[in-house]
Image (tube, rainbow, N blue to C red):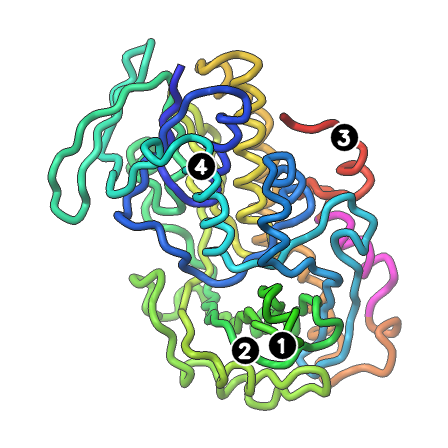
Amino acid sequence: MTVLIAGGGIAGLTTALSLHQIGVDCRVFETVSTLQPLGVGINVLPHAVRELTELGLHDALAETAIPTAELAYYSKNGQRIWSEPRGREAGYNWPQFSIHRGELQLILLEAARSRLGAHRILTGHHLSGWEDTGTAVKAHFIDKRTGARLPDAEGDLLIAADGIHSAVRQTLYPNEGMPVWNGAILWRGTTRANPFLTGRSMIMAGHEFQKFVAYPISRSAADRGEAVINWIAERKFRPDYSWRREDWNRAGNLADFLPQFANWRFDWLDVPAVIQAASGCFEYPMVDRDPLDRWTFGRVTLLGDAAHPMYPIGSNGASQGILDARVLAREIRRSGATPEALLAYEAERRPATSKIVLANRANGPEQVMQLVEQRAPNGFARIEDVLTAAELEGTAAGYKHIAGFDRDALNARAPIV
């Protein structure tokens, strides 16, 4: 049996490696002609790191990533609201890794080419359509640069891991339209600077309508006593605000956001200095899509951002795509490359990820920052006077349960594959 995978990103490549692990033949088809280490930093949570570890990738990740030691929330005045240990420091059996998205993708790509064979990873192949014959799937491809038709491929299943602008999802849901913008714009960049706090801290400062996120992503820089800081500056406007919404990944302009952060100079981090020292930045609208009530159509299903794009709140986007891949592999191992396997995968993953999409729309665990802004906009003497212990601890614990990385449950459960 053969499984066709549309999309050579994190979710698609993890799917390929997982299928290879269970002895199932697969081929990956990626639209771009050259896979390059693009993007900025992401966090891979312990439940996803566990899956990558069980694929034999822990050491490669540890060579480049930072094992996150703590997550800390601060007010817009730089006052600590709450913090908690992360990864192994929190008692997980696996670390949480802060890593450059491109580095993670290259680790997956190199492993896939080595294990599956480079001829199984085809670039410059854009999925233009498919036919489900009932017993197989015939996929059609074009070279998107030239429009030239490429040879068809036939397999038992077609897995759409082709991202938030998925061609497969668009075909299945032609009236869905563009992703949903919530009014927030993210400016993202990386800066070489001195380490801050523990040197392995991930921080979020501000509130729902203005926020700054920062964390180090380079093991080699840390070994030199330096830091490559991945940062996100966020401003939220009214959803009907006139913005450059037609552009999903463009060079950012400091004048659009730096003045609003000019006074965010804390004794533990100089935010405007970090922003100004970056070699450049990119602008992204914060978008997602409404949860679907169906992913699987015969021998075709959605996976990763094609299935459940979500706001980058709670560090969950890439991690959930990795979990999708593992559950899919488990079900194919149980039922073969069949529609029944796809339906079993969807039955577990669609409800779980829909809850996360909706939780992120409600601001996820970052809601504590908004509560502080509402109750103590000018600062506080003691956080206990602003938030109860239940509000502080319950928000984080509840989100971990929804997102599937409750520590005790994760440490105790059997492997997915």
Q: Nearer the viewer, mark 1 or mark 3?
A: 1
- Foreground residue, 288 or 44? 44
Where disc 2 sits, the SS reads strand
The one nearer the camera, 237 or 213, is 213
Q: Position of residue 24 (x, y in %)?
A: 47, 20
Q: Which residue is drawn at 75% across and 38% down?
A: 410
Q: Which residue position is annotated with label 4?
A: 114
Q: How crowded is mark 2: few (under 14 residues within 10 Å), some or many (20 or more)?
A: some
**Mark nearer the viewer, 4 or 1:** 4
Give the x, y percent position of residue 404: 69, 40
Between disc 2 and disc 4, whose residue precedes? 4
Q: Which of marks 4 and 1 is nearer the N terminus?
A: 4
* 270 over 118 or under it: above or below: below
Q: Please, what is the three-letter code of the amino acid marked with disc 3?
A: Arg
Asked if labels 1 and 2 touch by Cβ distance under 8 angstroms, the answer is yes
Residue drawn at x 86%, y 57% is: 390
Amino acid type of disc 4?
Ser
Q: Is the magenta stretch mostly helix, strand or loop?
A: helix
Residue 307 visible somewhere in the drawing: no
Viewer-side label of 2, 1: 1
Q: In this view, does 43 lie above or below 110?
A: below
The residue beneath circle 3 is: 413
Q: Can residue 302 be seen in this view?
A: yes
Q: Which residues lie in the magenta part?
A: 387-399
Q: Is residue 181 left or right of residue 52?
A: left
